[in-house]
Image (cartoon, grey):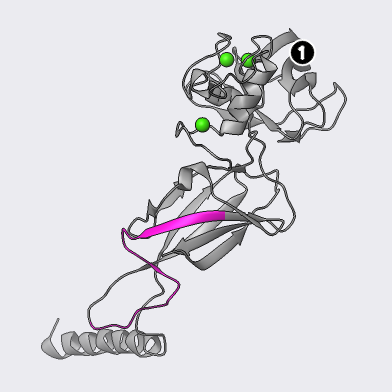
Amino acid sequence: MNASSTRARWTGLLAAVGLALGSGLSLTAFPPAPYYTLFGVVRDQVGTALDVEGADVILLRDGIEIGRTPITGDLRLDLNYELNISIEQGRANTRTYSDRTVARQGLFSLAVEMNGETFYPIEADGTLRAGEGGERVRLDLNIGADANGDGLPDAWQEWQLYQAGFRPGDDGWNIDDITRDGDYDGDGTSNFLEYLAGTFAGDAAERFELIITGRTDALVSFEFFAITGKVYAIESSTDLVNWTPVPHRLSPTGEDSDYSRATVVDILPIYVVTEPGAQRFYRITVR
Ligand SMILES: [Ca+2]
Ligand SMILES: [Ca+2]
Ligand SMILES: [Ca+2]
């Protein structure tokens, strides 16, 4: 290889680089701020996922709204809101990208608006701190007053005590008896999981579980305690470690679906097409 052919190749290479730069110059000088994305399930004070027309999650900075996102009722997703928060990158010598951004590690708060009323989720009591941008973080939001600060809506705790036959004493309800991680009725399901599943935390006959009732070459049959408004799905595993969603049906000849929303409070049958091979484990999820 002689000197002139080397030079020609360099020239060609530089030309290509110049072209790429030239086409890039028409873009804005800085990329948009990356998002800090929050997603999860917004629930009401009895633990039911919100499915209300026109309800929004509102993003506040210094108490002023800087963004909002709708709460959806989409059954296919394991969430009913997703909120993108623009994170200000704070580059030297640049103006603020937008007055709707939050600083890196900056403070913000959240509220939920529905039917013209504003509610403050327990998890967003006070302020929350954003990340650096580019993260996706699950934050389930439970609406309801939580005066005793244990993460469970007080109204739900009072309801559990009422259902278990208790009434308020001179000092009001003993809601501290129903702790988040405790198992008030001793049925093996924690109080918080009973809140999520919609079962009574003061009634051991109501618990969230999947019971296998039979198996044929065609179908595995189960039953579970269904609560109106809750959304159920089935997962299977061969090793109790890795779980895969499997379609289910609510009658032996019914249509398969990935999720079902209960319309009754009852023990319901549920079926899964028998998978070939070794033993399988099944579990049910609720939201
Ligand atoms: Ca509480
Ligand atoms: Ca329990
Ligand atoms: Ca129970």
- Seen as rendered, the residue at the extreme front is 170
The answer to whether the residue bearing label 1 lies less than 8 angstroms from the nearest atom of ligand 3 is: no
Residue 217 versus residue 256: which sits nearer the camera? Answer: 256
Identify the element where label 1 is drawn.
loop
Q: Which residues are magenta?
A: 93-111
From the viewer's perspective, tell me whether residue 209 is left or right of residue 192: right
Q: For residue 145, say whether it is visible.
A: yes
* Viewer-nearest residue: 189 or 251: 189
Ligand 3 quadrant in view = top right
Please name the residue that numbered disc 1 is placed on: 217
Disc 1 packing (10 Å; few <14; some 14–19; many ≥20): few
Secondary structure of the magenta portion, mostly?
loop
State the image quarter where residue 271 is shown.
Answer: top right
Residue 82 falls inside the magenta stretch: no
Q: Position of residue 211 (x, y in %)?
A: 68, 11
Residue 103 within the segment the image draws in magenta: yes
In the figure, residue 102 lies in which quadrant? bottom left
Q: Quadrant of residue 108?
A: bottom left
Q: Is any part of residue 235 visible from this angle?
A: no
Counting from the top left corner in percent of width and height, residue 88 is at 35, 70
Q: Residue at x 58, y 41 (%)?
A: 144
Rendered location of residue 151, percent (x, y): 48, 34
For badge 1, the amino acid type reads: Asp
The correct choice, above or below, for 174 with respect to 36 in the image is above
Relative image position of residue 259 (x, y in whole percent): 71, 35
In this view, 90 is above or below 263: below
| Residue nearest the observer in this picture, 203 or 167 | 167
The residue sitting at 45% across, 72% down in the picture is: 100
Q: Is 150 situated left or right of 154 in this image?
A: left
